[in-house]
Image (cartoon, rainbow, N blue to C red):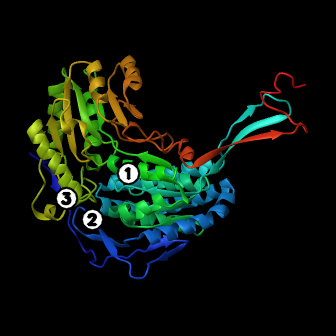
């Protein structure tokens, strides 16, 4: 089985000469002498998107040195002025939205509406963070002594390493960069190698917006070389990492050696619970988007569908009928529903899970690589559905692809037990018309995010983003919580009594 309507991608009039990009260090684009290079490619057709420097540990150290040198001046720049520079970056990104969105689609493979959405999320968050330049709230509290003020202020941490994944190649970097910059930190940014051009285009926008030299630096290369060098450098005080659990553990351990603040955003195995009273047509739209939007390559993607037995057969019939007309193909075609997966490695990993699923569960739909014609130049898979009991590997392990595990349950309580019985806790969802049950789910589901009558994807930038259990180490990105990742709290006591006062000791006798 497979989609009835497909639009394979093709290469039309594209130059074989890849545009070359250097490193951005201390306000200059540089290519170190003798540098090795790597290229990124369009996963839909094999087109080369850009050529990049394979950075070394020495390059990372040079970028950190530039960031450390620029830190004092940027810290002393008034926060509202830092916010103004961010607003200019957002303005320039709006002007470049269509071109940048197409770059996202060409380099990562998500359909063009989601490529534009990736950029729009960047714009929204940069604008939101610009406003924090006039807030950055502390606290003022009463003292137990006379003629004394007690307050807190926020201060930047210093040099921050931002290490980002390929699935949101502009949005996630901007979540980190904008929050770090507005709070007064300087940044060394290492993008995922597979989407290095998206990262370079983001840096060019900040450069044009007036970010001073050294405040934002950009080093491409492998995580094992550049990433580890950044994490190990004692001048880097905070590491912000988004990626897989296994790599996240390594980052955490390495960072702990230097007593650094390490913020981790890792995996998910996100459930939609579909109760017997759900609005099924609404849920159908949500499950399709949640499971197969971005080809399932979101940390919040709907990878489990937990369905009440009373509507199980009906809903699965609705879902497979829709997939028969679900177009898979050229992600630049606005009519395409799902593009390729991001790389050959991703495709191979997903296909291995599909073969595993065929042994331990019932394949209901899809389950194959799409081949023939222009499909052979890219990494196209069918949207895939397995009917599975809870507890199989495909129902508990993160696949990060267009594979949905459907699990039948007999009650709300069973649905919640199944939903919570995984190592992750990022996003969750319930479809129900029962307001009491909806609020129970908000309380019962072990996740950092819960949606009611909406899919597991669609976070908004003004709210915190993150999860529990192996999804991370407790922090949150976006929203007002974003400033907490990149600031230290300083407690301040101002005594204007003109005499020595001793808190606690003098409190009973003070005049």
Along the polypeptide, which appears first: circle 2 or circle 3? 2
Nearer-the-camera pick, 86 or 179 = 179
Alpha carbon separation for disc pair 1 and 2: 29 Å
Query: Which residue is label 3 attached to?
Result: 379
Disc 3 is placed on an element classified as loop
At horizontal 28% and vertical 77% (from top left) the residue drawn is 15
**Residue 64 to residue 442: above or below:** below
3 or 1: mark nearer the eye: 1
The residue lying furthest to the bottom in this view is 33
What SS does tag 1 mark?
helix
Which mark is first along the chain, 1 or 3? 1
Q: Which residue is mark 2?
A: 42
Query: How far apart are labels 3 and 1 at the CA level?
Result: 29 Å
Could you tell me which residue is drawn at 20 percent across and 52 percent down? Answer: 349
Left or right: residue 357 versus residue 151 is left
Q: Is residue 132 above or below residue 444?
A: below
Quarter that holds the N terminus: top left
Mark identifier at residue 250: 1
């Amino acid at each position: 089985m497979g989609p009835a309507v497909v639009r394979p991608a093709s290469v039309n009039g594209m130059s074989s000469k890849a545009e070359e990009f250097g490193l951005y260090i201390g306000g200059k684009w540089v290519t170190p002498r003798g540098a090795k290079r790597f290229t990124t490619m369009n996963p839909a057709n094999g087109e080369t998107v850009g050529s990049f420097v394979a950075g070394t540990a020495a390059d990372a150290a040079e970028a950190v040195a530039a960031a450390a040198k620029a830190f004092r001046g940027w810290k002393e720049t008034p926060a509202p002025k830092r916010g103004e520079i961010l607003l200019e970056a957002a303005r320039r990104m709006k002007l470049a939205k269509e071109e940048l969105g197409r770059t996202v689609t060409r380099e990562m493979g998500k359909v063009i509406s989601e490529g534009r959405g990736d950029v729009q999320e960047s714009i929204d968050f940069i604008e939101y963070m610009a406003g924090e330049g006039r807030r950055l709230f502390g606290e003022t509290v009463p003292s137990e002594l006379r003629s004394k003020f007690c307050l807190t202020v926020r201060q930047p941490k210093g040099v921050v390493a931002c290490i980002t994944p390929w699935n949101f190649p502009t949005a996630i970097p901007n979540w980190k960069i904008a929050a770090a910059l507005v709070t007064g930190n300087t940044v060394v940014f290492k993008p995922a190698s597979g989407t290095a051009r998206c990262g370079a285009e983001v840096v060019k926008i900040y450069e044009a917006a007036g970010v001073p030299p050294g405040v934002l630096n950009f080093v491409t290369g492998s995580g094992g070389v550049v990433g580890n060098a950044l994490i190990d450098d004692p001048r880097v005080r905070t590491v912000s990492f988004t990626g897989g659990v296994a790599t996240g553990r390594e980052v955490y351990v390495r960072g702990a050696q230097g007593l650094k603040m390490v913020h981790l955003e890792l995996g998910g195995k996100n459930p939609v619970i579909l109760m017997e009273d759900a609005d099924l047509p609404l849920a159908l739209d949500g499950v399709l988007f949640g499971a197969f939007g971005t080809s399932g390559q979101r940390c919040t993607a709907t990878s489990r569908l937990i369905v009440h037995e009373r509507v199980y057969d009906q809903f699965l019939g609705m879902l497979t009928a829709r997939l028969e007309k679900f177009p898979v193909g050229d992600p630049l075609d606005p009519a395409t529903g799902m593009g390729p997966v991001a790389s050959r490695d991703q495709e191979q990993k997903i296909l291995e899970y599909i073969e595993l699923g065929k042994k331990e569960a019932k394949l209901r739909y899809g389950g194959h690589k799409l081949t023939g014609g222009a499909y052979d130049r890219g990494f196209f898979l069918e949207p895939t559905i397995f009917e599975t009991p809870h507890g199989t590997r495909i129902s508990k392990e993160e696949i990060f692809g267009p594979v949905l595990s459907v699990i039948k349950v007999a009650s709300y309580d069973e649905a919640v037990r199944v939903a919570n019985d995984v190592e992750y806790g990022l996003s969750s969802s319930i479809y129900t018309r029962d307001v009491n049950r909806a609020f129970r789910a908000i309380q019962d589901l072990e996740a950092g995010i819960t949606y009611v009558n909406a899919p597991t994807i669609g976070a908004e930038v003004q709210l915190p983003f993150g999860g529990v259990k192996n999804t991370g180490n407790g922090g949150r990105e976006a929203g007002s919580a974003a400033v907490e990742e990149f600031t230290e709290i300083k407690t301040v006591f101002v005594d204007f009594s003109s005499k020595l006062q001793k808190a606690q000791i003098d409190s009973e006798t003070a005049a």
